[in-house]
Image (cartoon, rainbow, N blue to C red):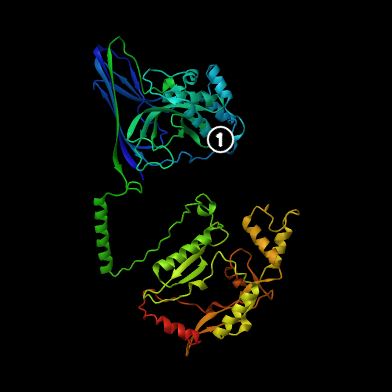
Amino acid sequence: MSILASLHHVTSYTYDHPVSMGPQVIRLRPAPHSRTDIPAYSLKISPADHFINWQQDPFGNWLARIVFPERVTEFKVEVDLLAKLDVINPFDFFVEEYAESFPFEYAPALKAELAPYLELEDEGTLFADYLASVPREKTRIVDFLVYLNQRLQSEVGYVIRMEPGVQTPDETLTRKLGSCRDTGWLLVQLLRHLGLAARFVSGYLIQLKPDVAALDGPSGTDVDFTDLHAWCEVFVPGAGWIGLDPTSGLLCGEGHIPLAATPHYSSAAPISGYVNEKAEVEFGFDMQVVRVAEAPRVTLPFSDETWAALDQLGHKVDEDLKAGDVRLTMGGEPTFVSIDDYQSPEWNTEALGPHKRERADDLIRRLRRRFETEGVLHYGQGKWYPGETLPRWSFDLFWRKDGQPIWQREDLIADEKVNYGVTPADAERFCKAVAEKLAVGTEFVQQAFEDNIYYMWKEQNLPENIAPGDPRMADEVQRRMLARTFNQGLGTATGSVLPLRRVWTPAGPAWRSEEWTYRRQFLFLIPGESPMGYRLPLESLHYLAPTRYPYIVEADPFEPRAPLPDAADFSARYSTGQG
């Protein structure tokens, strides 16, 4: 969410008598490389009797050259601009491969182009000692820049200096105090002596009061404010110029609006020029920032009046939809964040983890009790995201709208934390019991095996010194899959399968089964980690012409339905095998 801020900046010089002024150069227009959008800008010069020429210096900065043909008693510069403060991620950049680690050498052609930003000045002893203390071992360039920037912020105190000019690096290190321009120039020289092209930047800094106080550090300013500021930019191949603010120890963001970026601070002064004669002068300076427009956001939501208007509009929309017989449903997907383990991959990026299913199982059971539904829990397949080897699982709770129970024995629902020791033999007995209950014949129950040819081929492709399940295997999914399969044995069944199809007969609904046959005689599962029901080799079944395929046409979800039978009658009918 962006905030539109209005910045007003006035600088004035009042002389005790009319004076003749030389050309004045003003560098108070946002530079072309500003990442903050500036929708509107104006520059007003007083007195009105003057000539203005807009120019660009050799580094692309905007310059306003002002000439006064007559003597003046006042010289005033007024800047007004609008800044659209969209959040900027200062780390959102690409780095060329050869520059990913510090130290590195610029490509020869690029180094020649960056020559003005690599010029060194003869600094003093303290600077040399400080430079020698900077580590040179190989490290990521981003980490190195963050380290150096934060080190200056912690070791050089900030002070407001009204004196003109910039301290030398030795002066700043001696005093351990400096204004923003002093630490900015110190950082420029440090980076250049380390072989990195750097430039000095003057600009506006806008800081707005945060909506909520920080929980883990200083909250920042308690009022909205703006000021002239100075910082440093370093050139990293691929990323371009990266802003570093040693006053705060942070990378530059949306509040940093560059006005001039130059090899030397002397070319970046906001206003430069001269008066042709001596005179007493009174200096005036004023800067203000005001929020013009800001969108509601989580930390600063709508006002009560706006909420009431939105609520009224919502009721009006509901009335119109109801009048047009438009029926809406809405699904939600809340995100769970663990309060005691919020940094683990399973709560941030990974689909699975050691505790995710346990937490989900506990939550769905509590929801079942909370809603008092006596509903049935279904543990099945969820979404399958591109790039992930397995579909995610989904725990679902279903209940009847009329409040009648579907499942009353929660103790018969398997607990995720319990290992019940169920074996493939148990699965075969269960399938045969279901076949007998549904009267479809136990001869259609088939055992399912892991594909021995595939796993033997995978084993043959492993390095000689790595066995299936070895933790040195790079692919974690493959490692678990091979370990499980070889531990249980290639000749051991994984489970059993009973094909079932719902059919309608003159006597009512019934169940049918069939014999599945394969070219390889046995039912070999598709390799993977998913439950075997998701890995059935359905494409290996006998070909069936499209005209013979038993297509199932789903019923219209808006079709009127008769009330569901009474739960007790429904349960009794199926317990006796009817229907």
Q: Residue shown at 51%/34% (left/top)?
A: 146
What residue did someone put label 1 on?
A: 141
Residue 285 appears left or right of 422: left
The reply, left or right, for residue 490 in relation to residue 150 is right
Mark 1, Cα crowd under 10 Å, few <14 / some 14-19 / many 20+, is some
Q: Nearer the viewer, residue 1 or 304?
A: 304
Which residue is located at x 60 percent, y 71 percent? 536
- Whether residue 313 is visible, yes or no, is yes
**Residue 390 x %, y %:** 56, 61
Q: Is residue 70 left or right of residue 431?
A: left
Residue 76: x and y, percent? 27, 22
Where residue 205 sits: x, y (%)?
37, 32
**SS for callout 1:** helix
The amino acid type, in three-letter code, at marker 1 is Ile
Check the picture and name the quadrant holding the N terminus: top left
Give the number of marks. Answer: 1
Left or right, residue 185 beside residue 307: right
Q: Quadrant of residue 230?
A: top left
Q: Residue furthest bottom?
A: 507
Q: Is residue 487 above or below residue 193?
A: below
- Position of residue 16 relative to residue 383, above or below, is above
Residue reaching furthest right? 464
Is residue 360 or residue 70 the one in the foreground? 360
Is residue 215 shown above or below 579?
above
Relative height, residue 253 to residue 501 (above, below): above
Q: Which residue sits furthest top? A: 278
Q: Is residue 262 visible?
A: no
